Amino acid sequence: MPLDIRNVGKSFGRIKALDDVSLSIGTGELICFLGPSGCGKTTLLRVIAGLERPDSGTVLLDNQDLSTVPARKRNFGMVFQSYTLFPNMTIWANIAYGLECRKWSKKDTALQVNKMLSLVHLEDQAHKYPHQLSGGQQQRVALARALAPGPSVLLLDEPLSALDAKVREELREEIKTLQQRLEITTIMVTHDQEEALTMADRIMVMKDGRVMQTGTPMEIYQLPENPFVAQFIGRMNIVPADIGIPFSSNGGFKGPTPKTLGIRPENIHLLDPPEAEETLIGVVDRILRLGNVTRVKITLKKRSGHDPITLVSEVQGSGRDLHIGEELSLVIDPETVRVLE
Amino acid sequence: MSISPTSQNRLAQSFIQRTAPMDQEALLKIVVACMVALPLIVFVLYPLIHILGKSIQTPEGIGLGNYYSVLGNRRFLGLVYNSFEVTLVTTALAVVLAYVFAYGIQRTKVPVKNLFRLIALIPLFAPSLVQAQGLLLLLGRNGLVNRTLATDFSIYGYWGIVISSVLYVFPYAFLIFSASLAMADNRLYESSRILGAGPWRTFLTVTLPSTRFATMASIFVVFTLVITDFGNPMVIGGDYNVLATEVYNQVIGQANFELGTVIGMVLLLPVALAVAAEKMFNRNNQIQLADHAQPMAIMPHKLRDVLFTVYTVSVSLCILAVVGIVIFASFTHLWPYRMNFSLRHYAFDVQNGIQPLWNSMYVGLMASGIGVVAAGLGAYVTERFKTFLDSPLYFLCLVPAAVPGMVLGLGYILAFNNPSNPVHAIYGSLLLIAICNVYYYHAQGFLIASTSMKQISSNYDEASATLGGTFARTIRKVTLPMMWPTLLGVAVFFFMRSMVTLSAVIFLITPSSQVAAVSVLLLEDRGAVNQAAAFSVCIMGMVVASLIIARLILNYFGYRNISLIR
Ligand SMILES: Nc1ncnc2c1ncn2[C@@H]1O[C@H](COP(=O)(O)OP(=O)(O)OP(=O)(O)O)[C@@H](O)[C@H]1O
Ligand SMILES: [Mg+2]
C-alpha cells in the first residue's frame, strides 16, 4: 500500500532529529533510508511505526491519516536492530504472537507459522528458544514474526548490522527475494551504502534530520545533487570547477556558474605522459592495491592560483605498471563529470 | 503465496477502520499514570499535609506558636544537639569501618569472602533494635561481661546508642561500597603501578576518587538511617534522649500531638536535605566504565592480606557476638540468673501470645504483594509510558525516601483516625500497617524495579505493540515473564523490611494488631529480655526463611545473578 510521509518533524529537547521530512512510497517498493549515525533514520522509522509521535507532519497509508492510529493497530511489521525475539517464548510462539493478537484460529495459526518457518528455512528450529539460535537465524525469525500477520508495510531497522559479513550477504538476498515475492511495501534503515545500493528500489539519503536526496540507486550514485551525497555514496572526487577539468552541462544543473564538480574515481583514466598540452597531468602519490582494483592517489601539477589538488582514481587490475612519483596524464570523459554546486 | 497483496489490503483496512478518532492508547496511559499517582498522594502526601497542619495548630489558631515554644526551649535544643552528635559520630565511624571492610572483601585476598559478606549483612535480617538488645546482653548492667568479671559498668547512654547504631547501619554502607569497589578498570591500576606509584599512593589517586560518589551516597544514607532510628536509642539510650525518641514520648507518653508533629517536622528537614543530596550524587554515580575496561586482578600481598583478614574477622565477630548473644539468651531459662538451656520462651507465654508473629507475617505478605504492584507499576509507567507525567511521577515515587518513618506513621494517625475519611474503614487493621510499610519503603522498592526495567530494552514492548499486542497482553506475555525475578526480589525486599521495621508502624498498632518487632521493644522495655530475644530470633528466622525460599525459586529457574539483599 502506498505510504506518504508529509513534512514530518521531531525534536528531542534541542536536537532536531527530523526536520521537514517528506517521502512517497509506492506499493511494493523497497526504500532504504541511508545516512550517517544519528541522522534520524531510526526516529523516522519509529514515527512511521507509531512508536514515536511526530511534533509536526503526518504519515498517511493509502491516503488515510495515521496520526491517531496507535502502533498496535497500524498493522506494520517491524524488525529491530537487536532481534528482540521474546526470550521466554519458543521460535514457534514468537512467530505465532502477532496471529494470537489478531485472534486467528489455532488451525490457521499453525498453518501460517509453518508457512513462515519454511519461508525463512527454519522448519526444524520451531521448538527452540531464541538464545539457542545464531544471530542470523534469530534475525530470520524476527523477519518471519513481522511478516506472519500479513502486514501492509514492513519496517526494518538495520536488520543486518549485528551480523557478520557472510551471513549479512546471504540475508540480504533473502530479504530482497521475500520482499519481491510478497510484493510488500518495505522500508529498510541502513548506514551501509552497499546494502542500500544493492537492495533498494529507491534510496533516501539523510543528514542531520533532513532529506539530502531521494532517488534510485543509479541516480544517487551517478547524479548526486550535493557534495554530501556525492561523498557519502561511494567515493567522489570533489574539486573546484575552474581547474580545467572538462564537464558537460548534463544532469540538469541549473545554477548560474558551476562552482564544484564531482568525479567518480573509476571515471578517471590514467595514461602515460601525454603530448597534448591541454590534458591534466599529475604525479602518483600513493598506490593502494585492493586485489581486482587499484586505487591511485594523484596530485595535479600545480597551477597558479590553486592549492595542490589531489584526486583518487581507480583502475582495474593489479596496477603493476604504476610507480610512485611517476607522471601520468588524466583522461576524464566530460559526460561523467557531475556539477554539484 | 499465502499473503497476497489484496488480502493484506483488507486486513489493514479493517484494522484502521476499527480505530476511534482519538488516540485511546495515549489516554489510557495517562489514566494508568494517574492511578499510580493516586495512592502516593493519599498515603504519602496527604498524611504529610496533616502533620504540617497539626504542627501549626495552636490554641490561639493557626500560627507558628508551637515552633516558637519548641525552638525556644533549652531541653529541646539539647535534643537537637544530642541527635546530631550521635548521628554524626555514628556516620563517621560506620562509613570508615564499612569502607575498609568492603575494600577487604573486594580488593584483597581475604579468605572465605562470601561468609564475611553474609555476616556483614546479618543486621538487615533482624529487627532494627536487635543491636541494642544484644549490646545490653553483653555489656549492660546485667550483661555477660559485668557478670563474669564482677565489674559494674553500664553501656546505657551515648556510647550505647553509637555502637548499636554503627552495627545497625553497617550493612547499608557496606552494600554501597561493595558495589562501587567491585567496579574497577584494571588498566588504571596497572598504569598507576607502571608510573611507580606505591599502593598507598595508588589508593589515594585512583581508588578513593573512583569511590567518591559511593562515599557521599553512603554518608547520606547512613545519616538518614541514624537520625530517624528510634528503636536502638529507646532500648539503650537510658537518659540520653534524641529527637526520634522524643517524638515517641510526646505522642505515646503525653498524647501531645502538636509537639510531636513539630519535632517530626524538625526531623524531616535534615532527612529531606540528606536524601536530596544522596539522589544528586547518585545521579552522577552511573559508574562510567570504559568500553574495554578489564576486570580487577588482585595481586597477593602478604602483609596487606593478613591485616585485612584480622580486620574482617574482628568486625565479623562483633556483629556475630551481638546477634549471637540474643539467640543464646532466648534459649536460657532466665537471663542472667539461671543460664541453663530452656525452650520456655518459645511458648510465648506473654500478652497476645504468638499472635504478633502471625501479624508480622500477614503484614509482611500483604506489604510484599501491595509493594510489588505499587513499585512495579510505578517503575513501568515512568520507564515506558513516555507521557508528560513521567518526571512528576518519578519524583512522587521517590518522595517517601525523605520522610522519616515516625513522621509517616504520625501522619497516618492524624489523617486516617477520622471517621469521615474513607481510609478510616481499615484504620487499626493489619492492612493499613502493611500499606504504611509499603509507602515508607516505596522509594527503594521503586528504584530496584526501575533499575532492572532500564536494563530490559523497551524494544520488547514495542515489538509486541507493532505485532498488535494490547497493553494487557504485552504486560502479561512479554513484560512480566521477563521481570518476575526482579519483582520477586522487590517482594522479598518489602517482606524483609516489614518484618524488621519499627518506626513507621509504632504509632499504628493496636493491642490486636501488634507486630513482632514492636513486641520486642515493649518486652525489652519491661525487662522481659528472654521473651524479647525469642521474638527477635523468630523474626530473623522468618526473614532468613523467606530469603532461602526466594533464592531456591530463582536458582531453580536459572536466575543466579539476581541479588535479594538490599
Ligand atoms: N529518545 C530519545 N531521546 C533523546 N534523543 C534522541 C532519542 N532518540 C533519538 N535521539 C537523538 O535524535 C537523533 C537521531 O537519532 P536516531 O536514532 O534516529 O539516529 P539514527 O540515524 O538511527 O542513528 P544510528 O545509525 O546511530 O542508529 C540523535 O541525535 C539521537 O541522539
Ligand atoms: Mg538507528
Image (tube, helix red, strand yellow):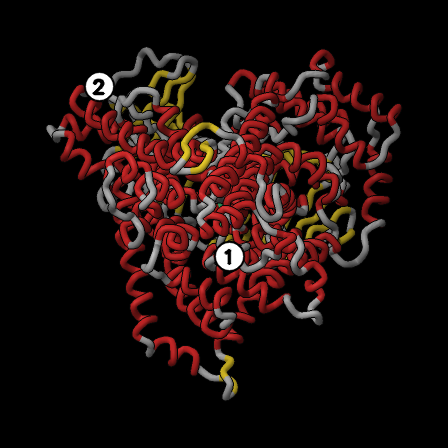
**Figure quadrant of residue B192:** top left
Nearest the eye: B392 or B170: B170
**Residue B170: x %, y % from top left:** 35, 41
Task: Please state, as top left, top right, bottom left or bottom right, where the N terminus of chain B lies in the image.
Answer: top right
| Residue B300: mark | 2
Q: Of B473 and B278, which appears nearest the observer?
A: B278
- Of all chains, the one bearing label 2 is B
Q: Which label's residue is closer to the chain start, 1 or 2?
A: 2
Position of residue A270 relative to residue B82, above or below, is: above
Q: Badge 2 local density, few (<14 within 10 Å), some, or many (20+)?
A: few
How crowded is the residue under tag 1: few (<14 C-alpha within 10 Å), some, or many (20+)?
A: many
* Residue A41 visible in the picture: no
Q: Which residue lies under the disc numbered 1?
A: B400
Q: For numbered disc 1, what is the local secondary structure?
A: helix
Q: Secondary structure at mark 2?
A: loop
Q: CA distance from mark 1 to mark 2?
A: 45 Å
Q: What residue appears at the point 38 percent right and 29 percent down from the top-left corner?
A: B117
Residue B410 image label: none
